């Protein structure tokens, strides 16, 4: 009986090389995971849905109940240079509101009984001329300045009416001669006559009549508003952008032959302020509230006198023409030509080439003298 002999070594089946299994651990893991998911796909789907619901609720709660600090967005604005506004009347820098104010004119007396006056130093422009008998009178114009007291207010004469008409200004006065009153009553000039608007004026106790009529900027602006005089359309003079006082002055003192005695006018240039300190009748000419008058620009014009005859038996200068003039500013003097074509036309100041003369910004004081005389200076 034969016995089968078992081999000590197991017999292995042979495989073809292209069917030999390859050990790929990652594929084995994926296969197992896929097999597990197939077997448990419904429970896993339920868990995923629950997780999504829980996360959604949590996020919604956070947005409803928690405040999140947001990073502020800083916007850097482009720096803009503020617009500089200059007064059409004086050339001085002013606010927008002041630049829109109407021009208001006032007739102010200059007899010895009226001195010292109020409101002269606040004026932007002052016209000076003989009224009658060598006695001078002032037409003062305001725009951005607000004088607390103005006076004494007196009557108007023909040359002042022609000057004021070019500024489209309301004119405060106490009556006047026939020629200017005709222009005022007909509406050619805005009329603020005290005769018809007494509430805008006050008769003070410290002066005797007729030197005691005074007003204020507030009262005149209220009167302007009641009459609809809320703006002024006019041509301003050319103004320099910057003052240029000389280091070698040629006109430090000025004598203006507007009249004689108590009405003789002199100026002294103050280099520190680049202004002209005004004197009258041999004494400093002072504003009652603000001290010595000191315009930035002094203009002296030769104007034909004793031409226009009015019903009061006086003759007056004709200012709607042309002539020689002198501009004093910055410590020097320039000879120029002035011209005015009519009441509504502005005075032009031109050099020998016909170019407009630049005036310093600030108060401008203009004096009319006879063609037979000239100012002197040194």
Image (spheres, grey):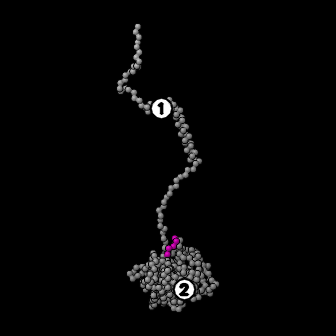
The residue at 51%/73% (across/down) is 94
Residue 107 visible, this angle? no
CA neighbours of label 1 inside 10 A, class few (<14), some (14 to 19), many (20+) = few
The residue at 54%/79% (across/down) is 122
**Magenta span covers which residues?**
92-96
The residue at 48%/60% (across/down) is 76
Where 96 sits versus 178, above or below?
above
Which residue in the protein does label 2 denote? 285
Where 146 sits versus 29, above or below?
below
Residue 298, numbered circle: none
Image coordinates of residue 184 in percent, x first then y, are 53, 81
Nearer the observer, 100 or 325: 325
Query: Image check: 3 left or right of 172?
Result: left
Which residue in the protein does label 1 denote? 33
Report, in whole angstroms, how far the alpha carbon at label 1 lies from the one at label 2.
111 Å
Could you say whether the residue bearing mark 2 is in a helix, strand or loop? loop
Q: Reply yes or no: does residue 177 show up in magenta.
A: no
* Nearest to N terminus: mark 1 or mark 2: 1
């Amino acid at each position: 009986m034969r016995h089968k002999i078992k081999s000590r070594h197991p017999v292995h089946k042979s495989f073809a090389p292209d069917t030999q299994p390859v050990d790929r651990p990652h594929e084995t893991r994926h296969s197992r995971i896929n097999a597990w998911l197939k077997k448990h796909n419904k429970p896993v789907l339920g868990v995923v849905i629950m997780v999504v619901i829980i996360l959604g609720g949590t996020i919604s709660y956070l947005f409803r109940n928690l405040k999140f600090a947001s990073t502020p967005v800083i916007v850097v604005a482009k720096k803009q240079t503020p617009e500089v506004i200059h007064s059409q009347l004086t050339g001085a820098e002013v606010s927008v509101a002041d630049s829109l104010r109407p021009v208001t004119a006032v007739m102010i007396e200059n007899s010895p009984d009226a001195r010292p006056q109020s409101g002269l130093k606040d004026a932007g422009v002052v016209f000076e001329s003989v009224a009658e008998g060598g006695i001078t009178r002032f037409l003062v114009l305001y725009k951005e300045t607000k004088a607390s007291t103005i006076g004494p207010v007196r009557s108007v004469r023909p040359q002042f009416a022609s000057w004021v008409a070019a500024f489209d200004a309301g004119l405060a006065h106490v009556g006047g001669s026939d020629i200017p009153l005709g222009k005022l009553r007909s509406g050619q000039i805005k009329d603020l006559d005290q005769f018809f608007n007494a509430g805008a004026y006050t008769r003070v106790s410290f002066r005797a009549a007729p030197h005691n009529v005074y007003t204020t900027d507030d009262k005149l602006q209220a009167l302007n508003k009641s009459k609809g005089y809320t703006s002024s359309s006019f041509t301003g003079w050319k103004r320099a952008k910057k003052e240029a006082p000389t280091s070698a002055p040629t006109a430090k003192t000025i004598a203006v032959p507007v009249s004689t005695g108590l009405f003789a006018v002199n100026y002294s240039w103050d280099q520190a302020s680049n202004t002209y300190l005004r004197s009258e009748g041999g004494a400093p000419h002072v504003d009652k509230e603000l001290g010595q008058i000191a315009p930035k620009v002094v203009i002296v014009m030769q104007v034909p006198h004793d031409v226009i005859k009015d019903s009061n038996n006086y003759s007056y200068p004709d200012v709607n023409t042309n002539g020689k003039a002198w501009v004093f500013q910055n410590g020097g003097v320039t000879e120029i030509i002035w011209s005015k074509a009519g009441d509504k036309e502005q005075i032009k100041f031109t050099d020998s080439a016909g170019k407009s003369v630049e005036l310093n910004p600030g108060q401008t004081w203009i004096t009319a003298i006879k063609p037979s005389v000239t100012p002197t200076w040194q």
